[in-house]
Amino acid sequence: MTETNQMDALLRRAVAVDRAANELRRGRAVLIADASGAAVVAAAETITADLLSQLQACGPVDLALTLHRANVLHVRTAGTDPVLIALTARLTAGAIRDLADPTGDLDHPLQGPFTARRDAPPRTASAAIALCKRARLLPAALLATAAARAAPAQQPDAIMLEAEAVLAHPLEAAVSLKRVTAARVPLFDAEQTEVIAFRPADGALEHLAIIIGQPDAAVPVLTRLHSECFTGDLLGSLRCDCGEQLRGAIRQIREAGAGVLLYLAQEGRGIGLINKLRAYRLQDQGFDTIEANERLGFEADERLFQPAAEMLRQLGFERVRLMTNNPEKVAGLERCGIAVTERVPHAFPANNHNEAYLATKKKRSGHYL
């Protein structure tokens, strides 16, 4: 396969994943295939009675949950991830939505007992969960298994894609980033600033590189990786330290003379704004930030560092002095081929609203706070 043909194939895969994710958000089914067959897939968060009936007409239906969420629901599992639960008559569309969304767990605590399938889940199940995450929905899906030839006939207008395309998508999207445009944008704390936009091949949200001054690629560049935070960056939320970190990094880079701030489209440590708000509701119920993410079915941190590494390389920076309190950011960038020559502390005082959040990051995630 020529390089052009390979790029065309990757683009088609990326676009198919993006379209399928949007179908799940709209409450529609998609087809995911692997070597053993195909599954008609719908998101648990957007399931309706009509869509559930359509799935049941296609074949046996399973509810796929992450192991984190299954453990919260006290499902007896074999330790596989994801966990598959056979649908029963009492699992109506409303009950399925309740199982996927932990914000109502305290309102109906006795949902089980549930028993998971003991055999290893198919790749289609892993891909279904990954596609829900890509759609910024709760990571829970319904799968109606069918023979590879039968599934398209049962859902003739549904988008069909390969499980491996979904599972490979996060990395492929990162390495497909291309510079789109740039403009001079004087900032309140750093007037000599340029903003450069990078867009992935699937047309998803852009990442931004904020270049302050004229950093020299011949020496390690002062760098901050900042995941977007609508509530903290824009609204001034006191529940986190994101707004202070953003504005403080801009000031510190300006004072140092030059540097780079990468503003990454990874809201809520990669789970999306709506799920971050759900996590806040769980924190109000007494769970810490890590417990909240895991009760939702996510990892404690879903972020990837490949997009940041790709942006830095395209900007000509292979070595950085990284402004962070998070040891995983250092390790993550280095795994992606960027040398971190120094960790530059970047901490701010706690307030009454975020002191427990910061304490959790220090105690459970090993942040230098």
Image: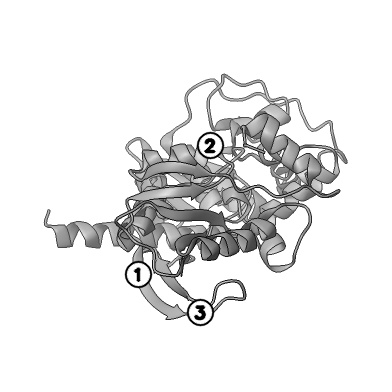
Residue 162 vertical placement versus 249 (above, below): above
Q: Using residue 2 as the reference point, say whether residue 236 is left or right of it.
A: right
In three-dimensional space, the C-alpha distance between marks 1 and 3, rounded to whole angstroms, equals 17 Å
- Which element type, helix, strand or loop, lies under badge 1? strand
Image position, residue 351 (x, y; %):
82, 50
> What residue did someone put label 3 on?
185
In three-dimensional space, the C-alpha distance between marks 3 and 2, rounded to whole angstroms, equals 31 Å
Compare residues 7 and 98 and report the one nearer the observer.
7
Q: Which mark is residue 51?
A: none
> What residue did someone put label 2 on?
327
Residue 96 vertical placement versus 316 (above, below): above
In three-dimensional space, the C-alpha distance between marks 1 and 2, rounded to whole angstroms, equals 28 Å
* Mark 3 residue type: Val
The answer to which of marks 1 and 3 sits earlier in the sequence is 1
Crowd rating for badge 3 (residues with CA inside 10 Å; few <14, some 14–19, many 20+): some
Crowd rating for badge 1 (residues with CA inside 10 Å; few <14, some 14–19, many 20+): some
- Which element type, helix, strand or loop, lies under badge 2? helix
- Which element type, helix, strand or loop, lies under badge 3? loop
What residue lies at 55% left-to-right and 50% top-to-bottom? 132
The answer to which of marks 1 and 2 sits earlier in the sequence is 1
Q: Which mark is residue 179?
A: 1
